[in-house]
Amino acid sequence: MDFIDESRIFVKAGNGGNGCCSFRREKFIPKGGPDGGDGGKGGDVIIVASPHVNTLLDQRYHPHYRAEKGRHGEGRNCTGRSGKDLIIPVPVGTQVKDFETGDLVADLVEVDNRVILARGGKGGRGNARFATSTRQAPLYCEPGVLGEEKSYKLELKLLADVGLVGFPNAGKSTFISHVSSARPKIADYPFTTLVPNLGVVRWKGSDFVVADIPGIIEGAHTGTGLGLRFLRHIERTRIILYMVDLSPDNDRDPVNELEVLIHELGSYSESLLERKQIVVFNKCDLTDADIRAKDAVAFARSRGYPCFVASGLTGAGIDDVLNEIVKDLYEHKSEGFSPQV
């Protein structure tokens, strides 16, 4: 399945039904008077966060949504049937923005969160509503009110406890496949991961979700590479885990690589640097990796980051990383952490 995390949709609520202009006509009842019924209300367009949907694929390829119209009123004071509401299921974590202004309309962060995107039109009144003592046979009835219509932009931000951030080929996919049942594509070339991956980790009685986003490169906060498209997926995470490559084949110095990652996140959103941050120097199983790790570990610790030397391939040092994550998540929960993004 394609991972679609943004889409534009057009919604049109149902029009209200027209009121009816009718008069009672029965044998032995002359001048029976007006009996035109009201029109039915048009259906609303409602967006709902569903646990059964993972992407915005449906909204990308079917962007137009129209709710049912209300039925017209009928004689004998019969009110027209109201139009059915139209429900649009979207993934939990979807943000709804006004397409014209960009204003945030709704942030659907919990299952069954819902909001009305367009309200159905009110049904028109039948002529029976206009009868008075001085106007006993009104020939007037109201038309139904048009339903609202509007365009919205949908953006999906994944909900995860830990966000993996690193350059392409830093070993993030190998790490998440080692600690969870997620099986992302793994290969020895940059940008193997082209879509975010989620993995559920169970460690010492605790469960948490890890998000692996495509690799970050210098200038990502301005849209370079996959840039802005995927950086938003770590905005909701409680912990940011920097994955730095210790491989001797890596032309980048580990210290410089970590500095660039911190700079890119801070340039995208300063609030990200206020989250708990952990540094993992990966691929310690390779030759000379320990030499490259020495200065890098000293630098990370001087900045106050918990740091670990590990290997996502062999599992060396991974237990210590998971222990740190569980400890930090427990602290966040006790503090009632809730990122406002």
Image (cartoon, rainbow, N blue to C red):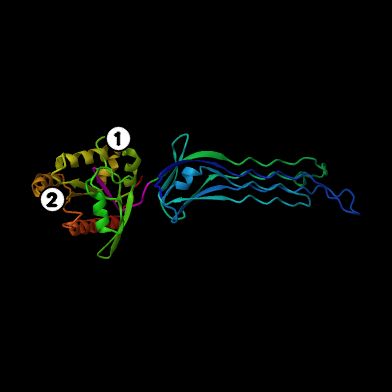
Pick the front one: 295 or 118: 295
Magenta residues span 157-167
Q: Which residue is mark 2?
A: 286
In the image, residue 201 lies at what x, y percent? 29, 59
Q: Amino acid at mark 1?
A: Thr
Quadrant for the C terminus, please.
top left
In the image, residue 211 lies at what x, y percent? 31, 51
Residue 330 visible in the snapshot: no
In the image, residue 164 lies at what x, y percent? 26, 49
Residue at 30% across, 39% down: 269
Q: Judging from the image, what secondary structure is the residue with disc 1 in?
A: loop
Instruction: Spot the residue most to the front.
Output: 188
Residue at 19% across, 59% down: 319
Q: Judging from the image, what secondary structure is the residue with disc 2 in?
A: loop
Pick the front one: 186 or 19: 186
Residue at 74% across, 52% down: 78
Q: Amino acid at mark 2?
A: Leu
| In magenta stretch: residue 166 | yes
| In magenta stretch: residue 191 | no
Q: Nearer the viewer, mark 1 or mark 2?
A: 2
